[in-house]
Image (spheres, rainbow, N blue to C red):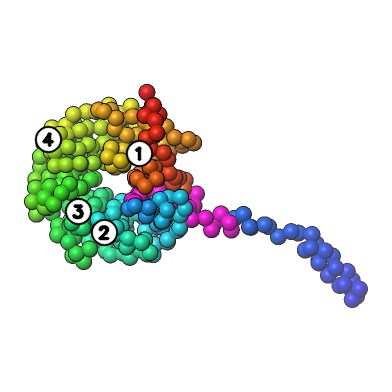
Amino acid sequence: MNHHGFRALAVCAALATGCTQAPDLSAARAEAQKPVQRYDAIQALAAHGEKVAAGTRSGAVLVSADGGRSWHRQPLAGPSSITGMDVCPDGRFIAIDFYRKVWTADAQLSGWTAQPLEAPHTALAVHCDRQGRWWVAGTGALIVRSDDQGKSWVKTDLQEDLQITTVQMVDELNGFATGEFGTVVVTTDGGQSWAKRGALPEEFYPYAALFVSASEGWVTGLAGQVLKTIDGGVSWTPQVNRSGAPLYRVFMHAGTPHAVGAGGAVVRLQGDEWVSIAYADARPVPLSAGASVLAHNTLLIGGPGGLLRAVGDGSSSRHGAAK
């Protein structure tokens, strides 16, 4: 082939290349820059004033300084999956990681640092009490406490083969933990010792618990069950859950217990019944996280598919509850 033939081939190749348009990736790049991703599963929420943190399954924490109106993404180092979160009285955030770590951030949510957690093997609940002590409970019937922000831990082993799924101190001395097979254990000496008290009926498996005093509290479980105690866990009374949904998180908002759960359920206690709060564009997905942002009279809810949003608390009209 002479040089004219090579030139013709080169021209054809150039023309062919020029006719093939490069793919437009601008939409994909814009999507990737968003703080909340569609693959995010929100598993934990905690708020202090207008500071809010949302823990994800995918190794990131989403933080907001304006009560959830806008978000910033903070990736966590190493394999991470945040399963629980709480706030201390000084505004410090603490979170438990499926990969046997405890994360902490200051009150400004400026960054997260991790500390190893030797026990329990799988942490299922985390709590920071009024004295700033950290509590973690989980598998192996273990409850651990740190008085020095995670530098050292005191371990209580209940010597049973069960999971402790909730732990909460209601004051300096009194606290509750609940777990598999209807287990209820209490402390009356600030966590120095824990002992069984009563039992949840029919080997109840508790998803979430909320105690407002040393005598009064609620526990949620399978098939939408809600139980209440007014004698510190000695006895329990079933309550009506109008939503019918299992409730995965229970928390206080404006002085009233609220909860989120399966099927996009957002509910509050009204009298002796749990009633649904209607909100726009509800999605029938399991809500694993909920928190109160009292400054905006809103509830933050979180779930799979990047679901992270604020909804009204229904306070403007008590007729918004489902019948």
Q: Is residue 144 magenta?
A: no
**In front here: 16 or 186?**
186
Q: Residue at image x 10%, y 42%?
A: 196
Crowding at label 4, few (<14), some or many (≥20) Cα neighbours within 10 Å? few
Q: Circle 3 sits on which residue?
A: 130
Amino acid carrying label 1: it is Val
Residues at discs 4 and 1 in contact (Cβ within 8 Å): no
**Left or right of residue 150: residue 103:** right
**In front here: 204 or 194?**
194
Q: Circle 2 sits on which residue?
A: 90
Alpha carbon distance from label 3 to label 1 = 24 Å
Alpha carbon distance from label 4 to label 3 = 22 Å
> Mark 3 or mark 1, which has the lower sequence index?
3
Q: Which mark is residue 260?
A: 1
> Mark 2 or mark 1, which has the lower sequence index?
2
Q: Secondary structure at mark 1?
A: strand
Q: Circle 4 sits on which residue?
A: 231
Amino acid carrying label 3: it is Arg
Alpha carbon distance from label 3 to label 2 = 9 Å
Q: Position of residue 39 (x, y in %)?
A: 47, 50
Q: Residue at image x 20%, y 47%?
A: 168
Residues at discs 2 and 4 in contact (Cβ within 8 Å): no
Q: Quadrant of the C terminus?
A: top left
Res 58 visible: no
Res 277 visible: yes
Q: Nearer the viewer, mark 2 or mark 4?
A: 2
